[in-house]
Image (spheres, rainbow, N blue to C red):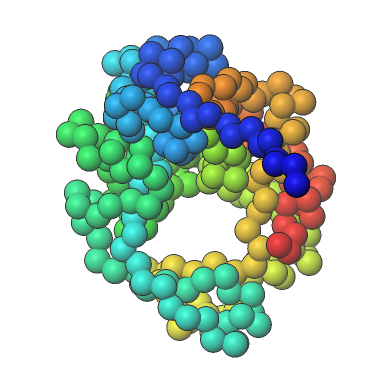
Amino acid sequence: MAQRNERIKPEAHVSKQQILAGLKKLGLKKGDIVGVHSSLSSFGQVEGGADAIIDALLEAVGKNGTIVMPAFSANREMLALTPEMKAAGVSWLMKILPYDSDREPCWTGAIPESFRRRKQVLRSLHPLFSLAATGRCARMIIEVGRNGALPAWKKMLELGGYVLLIGVGLESCTAMHLAEERVKLPGHIQKKLTPPKWLLDSYPSKEWDWDVGPYPDFKQMEEPCLNRGIMKTVKVGNATLRLLKLRELVDLYTEYLQKKPDMFYHET
């Protein structure tokens, strides 16, 4: 019996300087405001770990730049869904627990967890969807972020900010929800996304986190972004880095959401 000859993909070893070179190749420059979604493991092995990536980002944007990362907190307790909830399209139900912005870890990855622990980094006070930021515009963005991540992303859009995806795709880009504020979705989709009154009355949003209906499939926008030329990509180690101007991304998603909403709101 012949033995299979399989090629095992070698694990990449990446340095801070390689990451910095990749960021510069993407066009990230001094003074830029950038929101970062990331995966440390996507690179392979990084010399210096998460801190090396953070240091590369800080060097790329310089002292007049701003770095923002989602630092969504884990202070919530998952509850089992009842048959009635499932029938109503409830995706999850979580009890919000007490939140300490200085101590509560985030579940958005090793890079934002290391980032939010740095002394010069500020963290917003939203009990679930906080952001961590440092740099020239950090305080302004974090203050807006007390009302949630979306107001902060909107402020970044107004300031001409970018989105940087490190080893992850557009499915991680929560700022794309901004397009939903601009578009009136057709009735059959709105029906799926509308929570029943009993859910609103029984589980108020200040104490509970829940979602109803299908989550938009943001990844569908990757090809349109590449075709339109608003997404730049570079490979560093095993990771693909993607950079987009936030306004261009949200504008293009709005255009597609108006024309082809079923492309994004489909049952999984």
Residue 177 on image: x %, y %: 58, 48
Going by the picture, which residue comes out furthest to the front? 1
Q: Is residue 142 visible?
A: no
Instruction: State how many labels appear.
Output: 0
For residue 122, what is the image quadrant?
top left
Residue closest to the eye, 112 or 67? 112
Q: Is residue 85 left or right of residue 159?
A: right
Relative vertical location of residue 60 with respect to residue 184 in this rendering, above or below: above
Quadrant the C terminus occupies: bottom right
The structure residue drawn at horizontal position 54% and vertical position 67%, both measured from the top left corner, is 211
Q: Is residue 49 visible?
A: yes
Going by the picture, which residue comes out furthest to the bottom? 83
Relative vertical location of residue 31 with respect to residue 222 in this rendering, above or below: above
For residue 85, what is the image quadrant?
bottom right
Q: Is residue 112 left or right of residue 213?
A: left
Residue closest to the eye, 263 or 258? 263
Going by the picture, which residue comes out furthest to the right? 259
Relative vertical location of residue 258 with respect to residue 111 in this rendering, above or below: below
Residue closest to the eye, 95 or 23? 23
Residue 26 on image: x %, y %: 54, 16
